[in-house]
Image (cartoon, grey):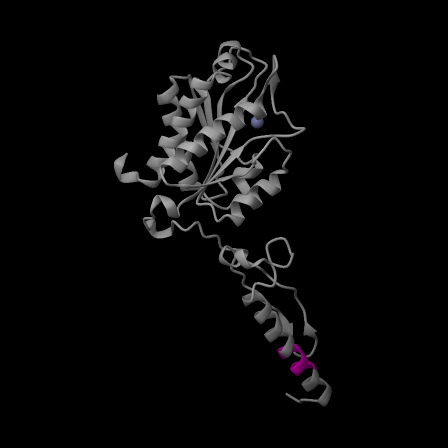
Amino acid sequence: MKWSLQKIEITVAAVVLVILLVWMGSAGVWSANGEIAEEEDKQVFREQIAVKMDVTKGLLGGTEKEYIYYTGLEGGAKKAPDEIVIAIDAGHGGADDGCVRRGVKEKEVNYKIAEKVQKKLMGLGYQVVMVRESDTFMTLTKRVKVARRAHADIYVSIHQNSSDITSARGVEAYYSGQNAKEDSKRLAELLHAQVLQETGANKRSIYEWEEFHVIRESVMPSCLIETGFLTNASERYRLSDDSYQEKIAEGIVSGIQQYFNPETE
Ligand SMILES: [Zn+2]
C-alpha cells in the first residue's frame, strides 16, 4: 500500500471525525427524534453509532442508531410502591371531546375515572403522573413524551367506546405487540379482569392492536382500556354515575397492584 501525503491527511481527518462521532454518541448529543437530548433522556436511550468509512474516500455511510429502552423493572427487580411511577392518561381533552352522546362527553368520563385512579394509587404509595392534567388538548406525541420524561414504569390510557350498534356494551383492553409485548399483555389482562370483576360489566375482548399511538410508542408496558360504550343507553347512564366510575377506578387500581405484585395473584 502506497501512502501519499493526501491519503494520510484524509485518514487523519476521518479518524478525528469518527472519534468525535463516537464521543457525541456516548455523550447523548443525539436523541430519538434528532433533537439535542435532554439530560433525563440519557437513561432511556442508548445509542450505537456505526460509521462506515474508506480511508481513501472518507466517510461513506451515515450513522446508525439503536435505542434500548429501560422500564426499571427488568430482571424482575422488586420496587417499593413509592419507587413505581404510573402514567395515567385520560383520553382526549380540550377541543377533542372524544365520543359524545346525549351530552355525555368521553373526555370528561375519562378524566373523572383517571382522577379517581390517581387518588387511590397515591393512597397506596405509588407515584402517579397525570398525562393530561386538565381539560386541555394534547397531541398523542406529547402524551407519550410526558410519560417518558417521568420515567413511568407503566402507561394506562383510559377511554370510552362507541359503536353504530347501540346494543354493544362492555369492557375492552388493548396492548401493542411492538412495545414490551409480554408485560403489556399481562397488564391489559389484569386491568380487563379486575374492571370486569368490580363492575360486573359485559366481558368483551383483549386485542393486540397497533393503531393506538400511545400504547405503541410509549416505550414502557402499556395498556389502553375502553371501560364502556357511550353509545349504549344503559351503559352511558352508568358511566356518568360517580359510584360506577369509582368501581371502574377500583378495578384499574387492583389490576395495577396485581401487575406489580404477581405473587399475590
Ligand atoms: Zn377515546
The quarter in which the N terminus is drawn is: bottom right
Q: Quadrant of ligand 1?
A: top right
Residue 12 is inside the magenta segment: yes
Residue 38 is inside the magenta segment: no
Answer whether residue 90 is visible to the viewer in this image. Answer: yes
Answer whether residue 207 is visible to the viewer in this image. Answer: no
- Position of 231 with respect to 94 (left or right) is left
Residue numbers of the magenta segment: 10-15
Q: Main secondary structure of the magenta part?
A: helix
The quarter in which the C terminus is drawn is: top left
Q: Position of residue 147 (x, y in %)?
A: 52, 44
The quadrant where residue 251 appears:
top left
Q: Residue at x 49, y 17 (%)?
A: 239
The quadrant where residue 84 appears:
top left
Q: Is residue 75 above or below residue 249?
A: below
How many numbered marks are there?
0
Q: Is residue 18 above or below residue 242?
A: below
Q: Position of residue 65 (x, y in %)?
A: 57, 59
